[in-house]
Each structure stands twice: as structure tokens, then as C-alpha cells.
Image (cartoon, rainbow, N blue to C red):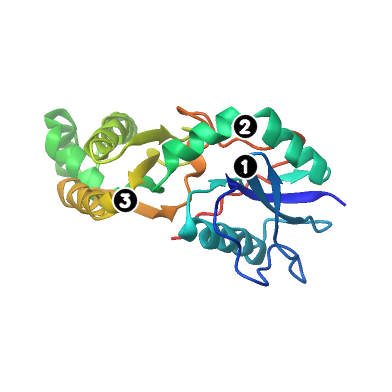
Amino acid sequence: MSTYVYGITAVTHPSLPEGMGGVGDPSRPVRILRQGELAAVVSDAPDGLRPKRRELLAHQNVLSEIGAAGCVLPMRFGSVAPDDDSVTGVLAERADHYLERLRALDGRVEYNIKANHVEDAVLHHVMAGNPEIRALAEANRQSGGGSYEDKIRLGEMVAAAVKDKESEDGPALERALEGVADAVSVGPESTGWLANVSYLVKRESAEDFLAAVERVRADMPHLEVRLNGPLPPYSFVEPGPAGPAEPAGTAAAGADTEAG
């Protein structure tokens, strides 16, 4: 039977709570595979696993329980290996990397920030800051709405100004928060958000980070800023901006287990 992998810890990590269940219906018992200085938290993989809410929460709950007792390198939902030996083989093969990551991420959590413009607020912002747009809008108003061409031109000018504002606000938000984080991982641009950034934060500094988020909300009221966390450090299992590592032979289902 194939093996579902939740995360990787040090072999010295405290034992799992008795009777912990993971994904599947009924839930599969969670167990530990040990290899040298490392351990993998796994269960049998159910057939036909899908990223439904129940399964996502089961995955997240296992990681939350493990993470509460010590550092864990989380795997994304859907990480499945052919069998237990495949998992322990990867632990042996990548032992130096995983041990380095466990040391680097110890005592740290991830917060994910997503942001988009509040439509009415950013339009007001754009109008207030662009005399040319204001002048054309006023001319159109005084002429009863303006010609078709003038309406098209105004729409294009506003759209371009909003796009320019997006390109400014994403980096500005990132800069405002990076000083209170240990590391930053920028998500893919094709997410529908003008900013999608994960921050690695010391547990003891979490209040400072959350205060900085509130300052951003106050300073940039034309942004909708969505905060997820604390999360296991999914975005930092690999050093730098790369995504989380997965044992060889796994297949990610493409769903994060973020909890708001």
C-alpha cells in the first residue's frame, strides 16, 4: 500500500498523541517512520484521495499537532510515496538538507499575506492622484457623459493607472513587512492577487509581525489585506524562494492547507 506523508521531523521529536488519525474515511492511523536522525510522519494512503475540506483539515490538524511539540517540515496535501521504504530512502538520501532545514525553521511559523485593491477606494486614489484623468472625467460629466471615444479613452486611462498602482502596491506591502520577518517567499504572480507573499516569523515575534500587518492596513486603506497563519512553514522547506520539498515519487494534489 502507498504511504501518505504529512511531514518530516527530527527523530528526537516528542511522540505522537495516542490514536491520532489522518486523511481518509475512516481516517488512517498516523505513525512514524525513522531513519537515522530523521523521522517521517505518515499514514497509509487512502484510494481516490481528493482535496476536499475534510481531508485538507485532517492534513492540517496532523501538522498542527506535530508542530505544537516541535519543528516539522510540512509536506503539501497529497504527498504520496509508493511505500514506506521509499520514504525512508529519501530521508537517508536528503538527510543533510532536511536536518539543515529543521535547524533553520526551529521556533518559526509561516504567515501568508494576500492583497488586492478595494475597487472604489483605489479608483478614488487614482482619480485624486492623476490630474489628466480628473480633467477628462470632468469634461465628460459636463458634456452629459462624453462621446463614445472619450468614454473609451477615460476607461483605458483609469485601467492603466490602476495597473500601475498594482505594480507599486505589491512591492510596497512586501517591503513594509519584510523587516519583521526572518525570510520572505513570494508566491506566483498568476494567483489573482496583486500580492501573495509568505513570511517566516519567529513564534516569539508573532505579535510584532501582526502589529506590522495592522499598520499596513491603516497606511494602505485602498488594499484588502488577507492574513493566513500561523501555518507550518510550507514555503520555506526548501531554502530561498523554491517551493516545499516532497519525497521522490510523490504527487501533490495542488491544494494548500491554509487555515484562516
Crowd band around label 3 with a 10 angstrom C-alpha radius: few (<14), some (14–19), many (20+): many
Q: Which residue is mark 2?
A: 95
In the rendered image, the vertical position of residue 146 relative to residue 59, given as above or below: above
Residue 241 appears at what percent x and percent y?
Answer: 46, 28
Q: Residue at 26% across / 40% down in the picture?
A: 177
Q: Secondary structure at mark 2?
A: helix
Query: Of the residues shown, which amino acid type is indicated by label 3?
Result: Val
Q: Are marks 2 and 1 in contact (CB under 8 Å)?
A: yes
In the rendered image, the vertical position of residue 71 relative to residue 31, given as above or below: above
Query: Of the residues shown, which amino acid type is indicated by label 2?
Result: Ala
Residue 186, by quadrant, is top left
Query: Of the residues shown, which amino acid type is indicated by label 1?
Result: Leu
User: In this rendering, would 200 be left or right of 13?
Assistant: left
Residue 236 appears at what percent x and percent y?
Answer: 47, 37
Q: Quote the CA–CA distance across marks 3 and 2.
A: 38 Å
Crowd band around label 2 with a 10 angstrom C-alpha radius: few (<14), some (14–19), many (20+): some
Say whether disc 2 or disc 1 marks the residue closer to the N-terminus.
Answer: 1
Q: Nearer the viewer, mark 3 or mark 2?
A: 2
Say whether disc 1 or disc 3 marks the residue closer to the N-terminus.
Answer: 1
In the rendered image, the vertical position of residue 61 relative to residue 169, given as above or below: below
Q: Quote the CA–CA distance across marks 1 and 3.
A: 38 Å
Nearer to the camera, 155 or 143: 155
Q: Which residue is mark 1?
A: 38
User: In this rendering, would 231 be left or right of 20?
Assistant: left
Residue 225's disc is 3
Nearer to the camera, 1 or 97: 97
Q: Is residue 15 visible?
A: yes
Q: Secondary structure at mark 1?
A: strand
